[in-house]
Image (tube, rainbow, N blue to C red):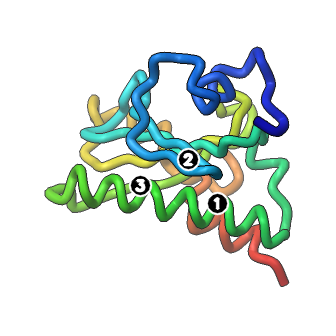
Amino acid sequence: MAGATPACIFCRIAAKSTPTTFLYSDDMVVAFQDISPSAFRHYLVIPVEHIPTVNELQKRDEDYSLVNHMLDVGKTLLQQDAPQSTQYRFGFHPPPFNSVDHLHLHCLALPFIPKWKYLKYTSLGSLGFIEAEELLEKIKPS
């Protein structure tokens, strides 16, 4: 796996070195359940390649395509698994709010469980939580 970091738990998950069950996988991304869910359904979609944080993403075709693919995978999974949900949220935590230094998209089918968890997934501009669509606009190639 290109750019894998042995100490990174998400690199080990993507390399199938853990007992994590994949909800989806291809040559670019893997998806699995968050170990500490904050909503009715809470999945993570991560790139197979180690990319530390959203700060590494640039206005490049490959970065835009990756994030767009991550979002498509997350939307598809939640629409299949939680069609009864009326609200979904998709986004990233920038440093220092990220818990793992490996890019990961949070895919949430609401409601939040417990309800106070919404604070962790509220967009506060460049702080806290960046909505996936907002990030796509930011890194869209010119």
- Mark-to-mark CA distance, 1 and 3: 15 Å
Q: Residues within 10 Å of mark 3 (few under 14, many from 20)?
A: some
Q: Is residue 84 visible?
A: yes
Q: Report the amino acid beneath label 3.
A: Arg
Mark 2 or 3: the one toward you: 2
| Looking at the image, residue 136 lies above or below residue 118 | below
Q: Is residue 136 above or below residue 23?
A: below
Q: Which mark is first along the chain, 3 or 1? A: 1
Residue shown at 60%/42% (left/top)? Answer: 46
Q: Residues within 10 Å of mark 2 (few under 14, many from 20)?
A: many
Residue holding disc 1: 67
Q: Secondary structure at mark 3?
A: strand
Residue holding disc 3: 89
Cα–Cα gap, marks 2 and 3: 10 Å
Mark 2 or mark 3: which comes first in sequence?
3
Rendered image: mark on residue 105: 2
Q: Residue sitting at 71 percent across and 53 percent down?
A: 126
* Circles 1 and 2: CB atoms closer than 8 Å: yes
* Foreground label between 1 and 3: 1
Specify the amino acid type for callout 2.
Answer: Leu
Looking at this view, name the residue that lies furthest to the left: 84
Q: Secondary structure at mark 1?
A: helix
Q: Position of residue 85 (x, y in %)?
A: 20, 56
Cβ atoms at labels 1 and 3 below 8 Å apart: no
